[in-house]
C-alpha cells in the first residue's frame, strides 16, 4: 500500500518519464491576479500561458498544487467535515500540455498511470465524455470516447452534460470539453446490486471523481460565442486526497494517512476517540481539514483579517474553533498545538511550513483566543435575546437577530439553532436566509464588473522596457471596455511599455499615451495574468496610430526611492532585531512606504532610531545599484538573495543589490542609494500576532515633515517667550499649573463645606421629608459631591434637588434617600420630566439622576417642577 508521500512522488516520477518538467507548487494565496484571491485549481499559475500572454518555457509540465476552494462557484465550506471527501485546502496532481500533445496522449497516460502503475482495478473505473450541446453547435466528444473505448467497455463510458463535462475558466476565456475519471469504491455486494454507472455524479461518497482531463480547444467570447484556440491545451487535475483513499482501501479521505495523524492528536487533546461519536467526528474532521488551510495560508503570506482573502481565512479558523468549542469542549486555544503533527506529515513536501512554524503558531493562537472571547460575548447576547423573546411570550427569535450573531460574532446559524434547541426555542430561518441573500446581493453589486471582449488590432506580446526607459515608442495590440460602479474605463495592451504594472507591493505607473492626434491619460497600470494592462478613461480615436508611452517621471522617481528604502530598512531590521525578521508584505507608493515583518514584540523607540541610522548611513554612502536580470534562481540563492515566502519564482529571477542588501525583486529602484535622500520612520504598529508594520517617508516627504515639526516647535517657543530651553519652560509651566490646580481644588472643597453647612441650616421639612434645594452657578462635580455627602449624613427622608450652571450650561440634580426610593419615587423619572423646562433631558439611577439642558433661565422653574412631580 502506497503512503501519501509515495503516491505524490510516483505521480511526479511517472510524468517526468513522459517528458514533463516537474515544477513546484505556486502559493495558495494569489497576489497579482485581480480575478482570484486563492489558487483554486492547478491551472491558475499557467493562466498567462493559456491566454497567450506569455510563451511557454516548457510545453509539458506536471506538479502537485496546493489549492483552496471556499468562495465563488467552488464553495465547499459547509460540506467540509460533514462528508468524507470535500475539503477547503487540497492538493491537486496535474499534468499540462501547451500546444504539444492532446486528447489521445492525455487519456493513454491517465490509464497507464492508474491501472499499470498504481494497479487500480479497471472494473472500478468509469469515464465521462461531453454529450454535446446542439444550441451551441457542439457535437458529442466522439474523439475522446473513441480513445476510451480502447480501455473501457462502452457501459463504463458515460455521456455528461455541459455542467459536468464542459470546463470553462470563467464567463469568458479558454474552455473545452472534459473527461472525468470516476472510481467505484463500494464493496462487491453493493456493486452487484447497483451499477456504478448509475451513481456517477450523484453525490455518492464511494463513487467519486478522482481525475478530470480538460481539453481546452475553444475561447468563449463576451457574447457567448465560441472560437477555436490556435494552440490547444491539456489541463488535468486529480484530487490527491481522493486518490490516496482509493489506493489505501479506505471509504473516507479522513481515514488515510493524510489526515489520521492529525485526527489522533485532536482526539488526544479532546479526551475522546475518532470513530465513536458522529457529531464529535464531524468536529474533528472540520478541525483536521481547516488547520491545513490556515497554516498554509499564513505561510503564503495571508494573515487572518476582516478584509477580502484575510476574512476568508479568519472565517475558516473561526469555524474550526467553534466546532471544537461546541462539540469537543475546547474552551481554550488548542489548534496551534496541531502544527507539529502537520509539519511531521507535510513538512518534507512543503518545507515552508517548517521555516514559518513560529509565526504560524503565534498567529493561530492569538486568533483563537480572540475568537473565544468573541464567542463568549455572542453567547451572552444570545442569552439576552432569548430572555427578551420569552418575556414577550414567544419562543422563536427573529432571523435578523440570528444574522447579527452570524455577521458580527461569527455564529453560524447551526450554532444558534443548537443553543436555542437546548432552551426549547427556535429561530425564524426564513428571515435569516433573506438577510443573508441581501448581504450577498450587496457584495455582488459592489463587485459587479461588465467586461467586454478583447478587440485585437494586431498580434504580438508586450515587451516591458521600464527598467531602462520612462518613454518608448509603442502601438496598441488590443483593448477592451470595462464597466464597474457606473464608470466606463478602457484597458489597453501595448506592444512595448515603460509603465510598471502594480505588483510586489509597488503601485502601478501613471502617465500619458501621446500620438500626433491626441494625448490619453493613463490613470493606472495593473497586471492581469502577467500581462501589463494600461487603464484609461478615454479610448484613443486613432487606435492604430503610433504612440509614445510616457511615464510620470516624478511619481516613478518617488516610488523608486521608497522601494529601494524598503530594501535598506529590511536589512537594518535584521541587523537590529535579529535574523528571524522576514518580510510579510509591503506597499510602495509615491508618497510613502509600508513594510510588514515578522517580529513578536513592539519595536522600541531606541530600536527604531538605530534602524533609521543604519538605513540613512547606507543612503549617505550613495551605494550604486547592482542589478541582475534573468539570473538562474540557484545562482541568486548562492549570491545570498532574500526570497519572500508566498511568492512564485521562475527558473530565472531579477536580483537587486545595494552593497550587502541582496533581494529578489521585480520593482523599480534608484540608480544609487543617495537618490533616496533620507528615510524617516513615522509609525510602528501591530498588524497581527507576530507581525509588525513600519511606515516611512523618504526624500522631499521627510523635508515636509521636518518643516512641520520645526514650525510647531517655533510656535511653541513663541508661546513661552522664545525660551532657549523649551523643555524646562514647559515643565515649569506644568508644575505651576499643578500647584494652581491644587489650590483651586482646596478652595472648592472649602466652598463645598461652607455651602453644605449653610444647606443643613436651611432644611425645609414637609410631611417628614427633609427638602434641600438651591440654585447656584457651580460646577456639576461640586454639586454631585455635596449631594453624596448629604446623603451620607441624612440617611432617611432626604430629598435633594439643585439647579446649577457652569459656563452657561444648566444642570438639574436630584438625590433621594433609600426609603424614599422604596416608597416609589424615582430620581431618573423626576429629572427627565422637569428637564423639559431647561430644554434638555437626562436620567440616571432611582436614587441619583442628572439632566443637562440649553436654557439656564428655566432652572428655578425646573427645581420647583421636581418638587411638584414628587407631590411635595
Image (cartoon, rainbow, N blue to C red):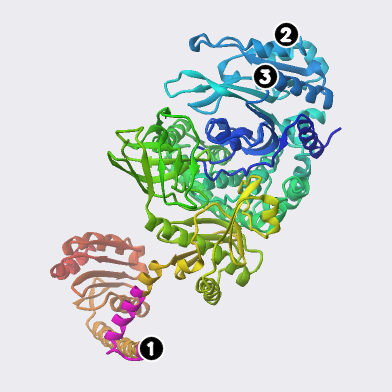
Q: Main secondary structure of the magenta part?
A: helix
Query: Residue 155's mark?
Result: 2
Q: Please give left or right for residue 159 compared with residue 505 in the image.
A: right
Residue 311, horizontal then vertical, whole percent = 52, 46
Percent from the top left, x then y, of residue 676?
46, 66
Image height of 259 relative to 735, above or below: above
Which mark lies nearer to you, 2 or 3?
A: 3
Looking at the image, residue 799 lies above or below residue 722? above
| Nearer to me, 220 or 851 | 220
Query: With 121 as the anchor, is 443 left or right in this view?
Result: left
Query: In this figure, which residue is indicated by the disc labeled 3?
Result: 103
3 vs 1, front mark: 3
Residue at image mark 1: 731
Q: Earlier in the sequence, mark 2 or mark 1?
A: 2
- Residue 759, by quadrant, is bottom left
- Cβ–Cβ below 8 Å for labels 3 and 1? no
Amino acid at each position: 500500500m502506497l503512503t501519501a508521500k509515495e503516491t505524490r512522488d510516483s505521480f511526479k516520477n511517472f510524468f517526468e518519464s513522459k517528458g514533463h518538467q516537474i515544477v513546484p507548487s505556486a502559493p495558495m494565496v494569489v497576489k497579482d491576479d485581480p480575478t482570484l484571491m486563492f489558487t483554486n485549481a492547478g491551472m491558475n499559475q499557467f493562466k498567462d500561458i493559456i491566454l497567450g500572454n506569455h510563451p511557454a518555457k516548457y510545453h509539458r509540465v506536471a506538479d502537485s498544487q496546493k489549492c483552496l476552494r471556499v468562495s465563488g462557484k467552488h464553495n465547499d465550506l459547509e460540506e467540509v467535515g460533514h462528508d468524507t471527501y470535500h475539503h477547503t485546502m487540497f492538493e491537486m496532481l496535474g499534468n499540462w500540455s501547451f500546444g504539444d500533445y492532446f486528447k489521445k496522449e492525455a487519456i493513454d497516460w491517465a490509464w497507464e498511470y492508474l491501472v499499470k502503475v498504481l494497479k487500480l482495478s479497471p472494473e472500478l473505473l468509469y469515464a465521462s465524455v461531453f454529450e454535446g450541446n446542439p444550441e451551441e453547435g457542439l457535437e458529442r466528444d466522439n474523439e475522446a470516447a473513441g480513445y476510451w473505448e480502447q480501455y473501457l467497455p462502452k457501459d463504463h463510458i458515460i455521456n455528461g452534460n455541459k455542467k459536468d463535462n464542459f470546463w470553462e475558466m470563467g464567463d469568458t476565456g479558454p474552455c473545452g470539453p472534459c473527461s472525468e475519471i470516476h472510481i467505484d469504491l463500494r464493496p462487491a455486494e453493493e456493486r452487484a446490486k447497483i451499477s456504478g454507472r448509475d451513481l456517477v455524479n450523484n453525490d455518492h461518497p464511494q463513487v467519486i471523481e478522482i481525475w478530470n482531463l480538460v481539453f481546452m480547444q475553444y475561447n468563449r467570447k463576451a457574447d457567448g460565442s465560441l472560437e477555436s484556440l490556435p494552440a490547444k491545451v491539456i489541463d488535468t487535475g486529480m484530487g490527491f486526497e481522493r486518490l490516496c483513499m482509493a489506493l489505501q482501501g479506505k471509504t473516507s479521505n479522513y481515514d488515510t494517512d493524510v489526515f489520521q495523524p492529525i485526527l489522533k492528536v485532536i482526539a488526544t487533546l479532546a479526551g475522546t476517540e475518532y470513530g465513536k461519536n458522529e457529531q464529535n467526528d464531524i468536529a474533528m474532521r472540520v478541525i483536521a481539514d481547516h488547520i491545513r488551510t490556515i497554516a498554509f495560508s499564513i505561510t503564503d503570506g495571508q494573515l487572518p483579517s476582516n478584509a477580502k482573502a484575510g476574512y476568508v481565512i479568519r472565517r475558516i479558523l473561526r469555524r474550526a474553533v467553534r466546532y471544537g468549542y461546541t462539540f469537543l469542549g475546547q474552551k481554550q486555544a488548542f489548534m496551534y498545538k496541531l502544527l507539529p503533527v502537520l509539519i511531521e506529515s507535510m513538512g518534507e513536501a512543503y518545507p515552508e511550513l517548517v521555516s514559518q512554524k513560529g509565526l504560524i503558531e503565534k498567529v493561530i493562537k492569538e486568533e483563537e483566543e480572540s475568537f473565544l472571547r468573541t464567542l463568549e460575548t455572542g453567547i451572552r447576547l444570545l442569552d439576552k435575546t432569548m430572555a427578551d423573546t420569552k418575556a414577550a411570550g414567544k419562543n422563536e427569535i427573529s432571523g435578523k437577530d440570528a444574522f447579527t450573531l452570524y455577521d458580527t460574532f461569527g455564529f453560524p446559524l447551526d450554532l444558534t439553532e443548537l443553543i436555542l434547541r437546548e432552551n426549547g426555542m427556535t429561530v425564524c430561518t426564513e428571515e435569516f436566509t433573506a438577510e443573508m441573500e441581501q448581504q450577498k446581493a450587496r457584495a455582488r453589486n459592489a463587485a459587479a464588473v461588465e467586461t467586454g471582449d478583447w478587440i485585437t488590432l494586431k498580434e504580438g506580446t508586450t515587451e516591458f522596457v521600464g527598467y531602462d526607459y520612462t518613454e518608448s515608442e509603442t502601438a496598441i495590440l488590443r483593448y477592451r471596455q470595462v464597466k464597474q460602479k457606473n464608470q466606463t474605463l478602457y484597458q489597453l495592451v501595448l506592444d512595448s511599455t515603460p509603465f510598471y504594472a502594480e505588483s510586489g507591493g509597488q503601485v502601478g505607473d501613471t502617465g500619458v499615451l501621446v500620438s500626433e492626434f491626441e494625448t490619453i491619460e493613463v490613470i493606472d497600470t495593473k497586471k492581469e495574468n502577467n500581462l501589463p494592462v494600461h487603464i484609461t478613461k478615454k479610448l484613443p480615436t486613432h487606435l492604430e496610430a503610433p504612440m509614445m508611452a510616457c511615464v510620470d517621471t516624478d511619481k516613478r522617481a518617488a516610488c523608486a526611492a521608497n522601494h529601494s528604502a524598503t530594501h535598506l530598512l529590511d536589512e537594518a531590521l535584521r541587523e537590529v532585531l535579529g535574523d528571524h525578521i522576514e518580510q510579510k508584505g509591503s506597499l510602495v507608493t509615491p508618497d510613502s512606504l509600508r513594510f510588514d515583518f515578522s517580529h513578536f514584540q513592539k519595536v522600541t523607540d531606541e530600536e527604531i532610531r538605530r534602524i533609521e541610522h543604519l538605513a540613512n548611513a547606507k543612503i549617505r554612502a550613495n551605494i550604486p545599484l547592482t542589478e541582475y536580470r534573468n539570473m538562474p534562481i540557484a545562482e541568486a540563492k548562492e549570491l545570498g538573495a532574500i526570497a519572500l515566502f508566498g511568492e512564485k519564482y521562475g527558473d530565472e529571477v531579477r536580483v537587486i543589490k545595494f552593497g550587502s542588501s541582496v533581494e529578489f525583486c521585480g520593482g523599480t529602484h534608484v540608480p544609487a542609494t543617495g537618490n533616496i535622500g533620507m528615510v524617516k520612520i513615522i509609525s510602528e504598529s501591530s498588524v497581527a500576532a507576530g507581525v509588525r508594520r513600519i511606515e516611512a517617508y523618504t526624500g522631499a516627504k521627510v523635508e515636509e515633515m521636518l518643516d512641520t515639526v520645526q514650525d510647531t516647535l517655533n510656535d511653541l517657543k513663541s508661546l513661552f517667550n522664545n525660551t532657549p530651553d523649551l523643555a524646562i519652560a514647559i515643565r515649569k509651566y506644568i508644575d505651576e499649573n499643578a500647584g494652581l490646580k491644587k489650590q483651586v481644588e482646596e478652595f472648592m472643597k472649602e466652598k463645598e463645606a461652607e455651602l453644605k453647612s449653610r444647606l443643613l441650616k436651611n432644611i425645609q421639612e414637609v410631611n417628614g421629608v427633609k427638602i434641600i434645594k438651591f440654585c447656584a452657578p457651580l460646577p456639576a462635580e461640586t454639586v454631585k459631591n455635596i449631594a453624596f455627602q448629604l446623603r451620607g449624613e441624612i440617611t432617611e427622608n432626604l430629598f435633594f434637588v439643585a439647579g446649577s450652571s457652569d459656563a452657561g450650561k444648566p444642570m438639574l440634580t436630584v438625590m433621594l434617600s433609600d426609603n424614599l426610593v422604596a416608597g416609589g419615587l424615582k430620581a431618573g423619572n423626576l429629572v427627565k420630566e422637569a428637564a423639559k423646562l431647561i430644554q434638555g433631558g437626562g436620567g440616571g439611577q432611582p436614587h441619583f439622576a442628572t439632566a443637562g439642558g440649553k436654557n439656564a433661565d428655566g432652572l428655578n422653574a425646573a427645581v420647583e417642577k421636581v418638587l411638584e412631580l414628587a407631590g411635595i
